[in-house]
């Protein structure tokens, strides 16, 4: 996993889920959103010890919940403000784009391809397990 590789390298992975993502019984369209206030606080307080910001879509640690395009863009903007590279772990990017199309206001008439473009347009880089949306039995980048 991404977390396992980060921690095996001696770094600390910090999860910053929105409060709604911590309540399984709560109906919320984007429980995979990053808590932007927590992201801002972490970068403000520990700027020198945070090498990068990574967002996983869909949020594996949160049970595969999607993130909104608005939240992805905002998380990228905060990272940029603090001059930190913004990476997307695109493990289930296609599913996340589908949920954006279904659930996010203003996205219903947009193509999945366009939504995917908009997701990755704000990233400085990406990683992906090819075992998921790429349908391979092993591998990734």
Image: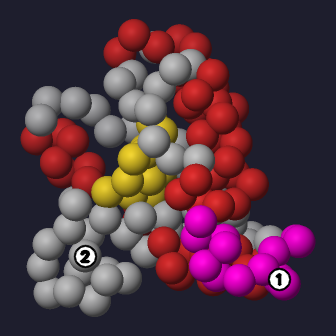
Residue for badge 2: 130
What is the span of residues highlighted in magenta in the rendered image?
Answer: 105-117
Q: If the image is split into quadrants, where does the N terminus sit?
A: bottom left
User: Within 10 Å of the Cα at label 1, are there few (<14), some (14-19), or many (20+) other Cα atoms?
Assistant: some
User: What numbered label is drawn on residue 21?
Assistant: none
Q: Which residue is mark 1?
A: 108
Q: How many residues crowd mark 2 within 10 Å: few (<14), some (14–19), many (20+)? A: some
Residue 121: where, in percent of width, then height? 58, 53
Magenta span has 111? Answer: yes
Secondary element at image label 1: loop
Quarter of the rendering occupied by the C terminus: bottom left
* Residue at 66% in and 71% down: 115
Residue 8 screen position, x and y as percent: 11, 41
Q: Position of residue 132 (x, y in %)?
A: 31, 81
User: Could you tell me which residue is drawn at 60 percent across and 40 percent down?
Assistant: 76
Query: At x 56% / y 30%, what residue is drawn?
Result: 79
Check the image and report above or below for 1 versus 44. Answer: below
Q: Is residue 82 depicted above or below 127 in this figure? A: above
- Looking at the image, residue 94 sits to the left or right of residue 21; the answer is left
Q: Total of numbered circles in the picture?
A: 2
Q: Is residue 47 above or below residue 141?
A: above
């Amino acid at each position: 996993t991404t977390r396992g590789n980060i921690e095996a390298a001696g770094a600390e992975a910090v999860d910053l889920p929105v409060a709604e993502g911590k309540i399984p019984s709560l109906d919320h369209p984007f429980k995979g959103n990053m808590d932007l206030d927590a992201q801002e606080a972490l970068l403000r307080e520990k700027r020198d010890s945070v090498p990068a910001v990574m967002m996983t879509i869909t949020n594996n640690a949160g049970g595969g919940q999607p993130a909104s395009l608005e939240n992805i863009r905002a998380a990228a903007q905060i990272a940029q403000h603090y001059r930190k590279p913004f990476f997307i772990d695109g493990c289930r990017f296609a599913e996340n784009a589908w949920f954006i199309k279904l659930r996010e206001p203003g996205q219903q008439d947009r193509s999945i391809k366009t939504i995917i473009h908009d997701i990755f347009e704000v990233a400085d880089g990406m990683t992906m397990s090819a075992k998921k949306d790429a349908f391979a039995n092993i591998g990734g980048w």
